Image (tube, helix red, strand yellow):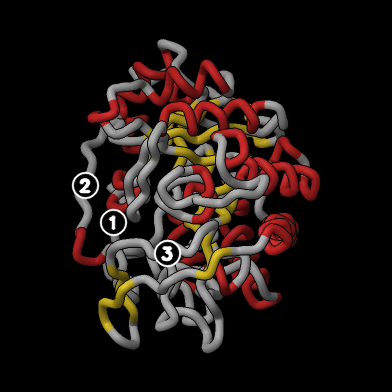
Amino acid sequence: MLRHLFLPVTLGDLALANRIVMAPMTRNRAEPDGTPGALMVEHYAQRADAGLIVAEGTWPTAVGQAYCRQPGIATARHVEGWRRVTDAVHARGGCMVLQIMHGGRIGCHHIKPAGVETVAPSAIRAAGEVFTDSAGMQAYDEPRALSTDEVRAVVREHARAALNAREAGFDGVELHGTSGYLSMQFLASGSNRRDDEFGGSAANRARFAFECLQAMANAIGPGRVGLRMRPGNPYNDIQDDEPMASSAELMRQAATLGLAYLHVMRAPPELGFDAFALAREHFGPRLILNDSFDGASAEEALEEGHGAAVSFARHFIGNPDLVRRLRDGIGLALFDRRTLYTPGPAGYTDYPSA
């Protein structure tokens, strides 16, 4: 019996009806300018039974856009579009936060508006390519290193994004601190070669993410702010000499802010350490656990006190009624990988409920 999954829990100022969280998933269904449309309203409303929905990574300014058809939270039109989403989720009794994601060096001029540059902690191009609607697969841009004053300006942009999210009706925000995007680019020694207060030691490399969290907390209250991390995540060409120590440093700094939660993914198995244990030691018990859980393993993790809630990603794609399926013991449907990032309703809003 999955008892713990269905107990309510409060994380900071966020009241969750159950401990089943929908993890953020890039799905590339926004309009070309980043405005959420009717498809996104339907998609999220279908899944509003989750105790908490963490909406997909959303850029705070056009400089931070990483992907085609990725939503933004920078303009009045973005706010209006997201308001329709949050209204639909709230109408079904749901709770929803927005993940703020600055792509940093994971960017391409074929995706961003004309004249919008790509920036990073250091002028080090990320290996790899990205799909663009206009030119197919393209290499990531060579980024320009941010000046110290520009770093502080980006921190302020995160605070503005948090305020815009609240205006759009979100219950809070989550800083994307993994997967090779800007916060992790600052944290990792391989992509951060700075010699100012945002580079060098682990404490300095964690400073950018900490100051973003602090600014967002000051803007909307710490109990409405979360952080997502995957210690040692190599995705998007991230290399770090000491991933465990770097992650622990950011966790310790974040713990001083009184945040709602830390959303933590398992570390890559080859690194040989337990990211959940690391998070409990350095952040505390308000953890949302993620990565490869099913109902039984999620229940076990909660029963054993490893975290306060568990998030699901892939299971929420093919199962809009995942909460009911877990509660009633109904088998889970598979999802179609071919339609993860394609435009239109196929593989997005057309998965049936049981």
Q: Position of residue 155 (x, y in %)?
A: 69, 55
Identify the residue at image location x=61%, y=45%. 209
Residue identifier under label 1: 352
Label located before the other in sequence (1 or 3): 3
Label located before the other in sequence (2 or 1): 2
- Label 1 sits on what residue type? Pro
- Label 3 sits on what residue type? Ile
Residue 257, compared with residue 284, is above or below; it is: below
Q: Position of residue 3 (x, y in %)?
A: 42, 18
Residue contact at pointers 2 and 1, CB within 8 angstroms: yes
| Left-right relation of 71 to 354 | right
Disc number placed over residue 333 in the picture, else none: 2
Mark 1, Cα crowd under 10 Å, few <14 / some 14-19 / many 20+, is: few
SS at badge 2? loop
Q: Position of residue 64 (x, y in %)?
A: 54, 67
Identify the residue at image location x=62%, y=70%. 61
- Residue 306 in view in this figure: yes
Residue identifier under label 3: 106
Residue 188, compared with residue 256, is above or below; it is: below
Pair 3/2: label in front: 3
85 or 182, which lies in front? 182
